[in-house]
Amino acid sequence: MHNSILNKWLNTNQTCPLCDSAQGTSIGPCDACREDLPYQQLGCDICALPGVSGRCNSCQNQRPAYTRIHAGFTYHFPLPQLLHRIKTGGDPEPLYWLAQLLARKLADKLPKDSQLIPVPMYPVDQLIRGFNQSELLARHLAKALNLPTPINLINKRKRTAHQASLNRAQRRRNLHQCFSLSRTPPERLILVDDVVTTGTTVGRITELLLQEGAREVSVCTLCRTPD
Ligand SMILES: [Zn+2]
Ligand SMILES: [Zn+2]
């Protein structure tokens, strides 16, 4: 299904999806828009919090369970708008070119011998949206980087309140028993998410994966929020 969408898009879409006027390229936006995207520059060595060199205060106080977060972009214009459009408009096509740009940026940084695993959505929410954006990102990314096809192994069992609106203790409570695994995880894996906001969700999933037998978990996110 996604291949046919992709081919159709590649054959017919010659307009830049961001500025709508200039000529798009085979990987989406025109050169000018692509260069203007908010690529993640400086960030915390562990959680990728933008604007931090070395480790942020939070990671110094308590090191997260994951090895580190690799982020393609800082969550600045036009990414919040674009992701909102993808999620509410039922059109996952831009995830293809976003994943290609993410792959280019992170190709040398992501661990090579790891299995990609998307952060899951609550099944009803996924049914309503029609897709899980993290799963599509992971699939496009795996193809672009020549990694094995991502596997779904994490189940989300509860619908959760938006993490950003909660304090640290509430965030952890919110995620208590929220996730389960359908089988033993591979030893080395990369969790794929579209936006990492506080890092609590990927941290909680990492703890679960490590408890159940994984040895090393890295995180790859399309975007990292600035705070
Ligand atoms: Zn453009
Ligand atoms: Zn940090």
Image (cartoon, grey):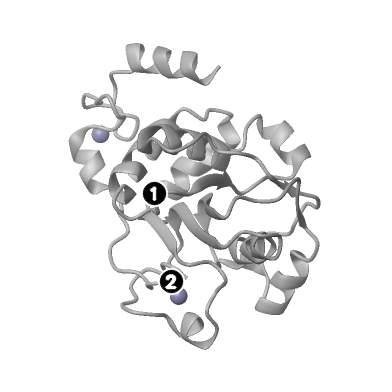
Give neighbour class at mark 2: few <14, some 14-19, many 20+ (Cα, 10 Å). Answer: many
Classify mark 1: helix, strand or loop.
loop
Q: Which mark is residue 185?
A: none
- The amino acid sitting under disc 1 is Lys
**Quadrant for ligand 1?**
top left
Residue positioned most to the bottom: 61
Residue 41 in which image quadrant: bottom left
Q: Position of residue 190 (x, y in %)?
A: 51, 52
Residue 46 shows which numbered tag? 2
Please tell me whether mark 1 or mark 2 is closer to you in this view: 1
Beta carbon at label 2 within 8 Å of ligand 2: yes
Q: Position of residue 126 (x, y in %)?
A: 70, 37
Q: Position of residue 170 (x, y in %)?
A: 73, 74
Q: Is residue 98 left or right of residue 206?
A: left
Q: Amino acid at mark 2?
A: Ile
Residue 207 visible at all: yes
Secondary structure under tag 2 reads loop
In three-dimensional space, the C-alpha distance between marks 1 and 2, rounded to whole angstroms, equals: 18 Å
Say if mark 1 contacts mark 2, CB within 8 Å. no
Q: Classify residue 111 by image quadrant.
A: bottom left
Q: Which residue carries the number 1 mark?
A: 112
Q: Is residue 27 above or below residue 162?
A: above
